[in-house]
Image: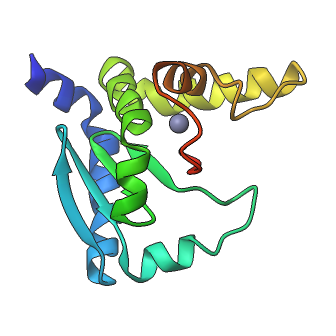
């Protein structure tokens, strides 16, 4: 039932497509990889690559869309972001509220809201670390 998985995650995919369109309009590109549309490069990628922590990131997944700084980065973080794609397929519209709730719970427990987030622990647990890139 791949169609159902795409439909369930579609509210976030739509947001990702709108942002992806901006990437294209500012000179970036799009590629279809493992059932997800990856957008990267151009002026948006250049601008985002200059962000400093805690706002710095290399890629972000929204449903079946992955937005990254450029296509080399997208390749490096693909395995991690694909875990998030599977999470969107399971959680659908509940994904972002559940993700934020998990971060809040970890923060209140005095732990790291990003790395100790349940969804990130699953994504890092299923993929090799140390690519040098910092996926979200
Ligand atoms: Zn992540």
Picture colour scheme: rainbow
Residue 10 image position (x, y, % from top left): 25, 38
Report the side of 127 relative to 15 (left or right): right
Quadrant occupied by the N terminus: top left
Residue 25 image position (x, y, % from top left): 27, 81
Q: Please say if 100 is above or below 135.
A: above
Indicate the quadrant where residue 67 lies: bottom left
Report the side of 11 relative to 116 (left or right): left
Quadrant occupied by the C terminus: top right
Give the residue drawn at x 79%, y 31%.
112
Residue 89 image position (x, y, % from top left): 29, 24
Between 97 and 118, the one lying in front of the other is 118
Give the residue drawn at x 57%, y 71%.
49
Could you tell me how many numbered marks the image carries?
0
Give the residue drawn at x 27%, y 41%.
64
Between 94 and 135, the one lying in front of the other is 135
Q: Please say if 39 is above or below 103.
A: below
Give the residue drawn at x 20%, y 24%.
5
Extreme residue in the right direction: 110
Residue 87 image position (x, y, % from top left): 39, 23
């Amino acid at each position: 039932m791949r169609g159902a998985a795409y439909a369930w995650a579609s509210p976030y995919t739509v947001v990702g497509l709108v942002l992806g369109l901006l990437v294209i309009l500012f000179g970036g590109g799009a590629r279809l990889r493992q059932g997800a549309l990856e957008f990267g490069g151009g002026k948006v990628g250049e601008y985002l690559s200059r962000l400093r922590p805690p706002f710095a990131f290399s890629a972000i997944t929204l449903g079946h869309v992955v937005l990254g700084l450029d296509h080399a980065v997208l390749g490096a973080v693909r395995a991690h972001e694909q875990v998030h794609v599977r999470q969107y397929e399971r959680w659908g519209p509940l994904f972002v509220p559940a993700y934020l709730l998990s971060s809040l719970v970890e923060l209140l427990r005095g732990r790291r809201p990003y790395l100790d987030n349940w969804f990130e622990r699953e994504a890092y647990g299923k993929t090799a670390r140390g690519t040098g890139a910092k996926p979200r």
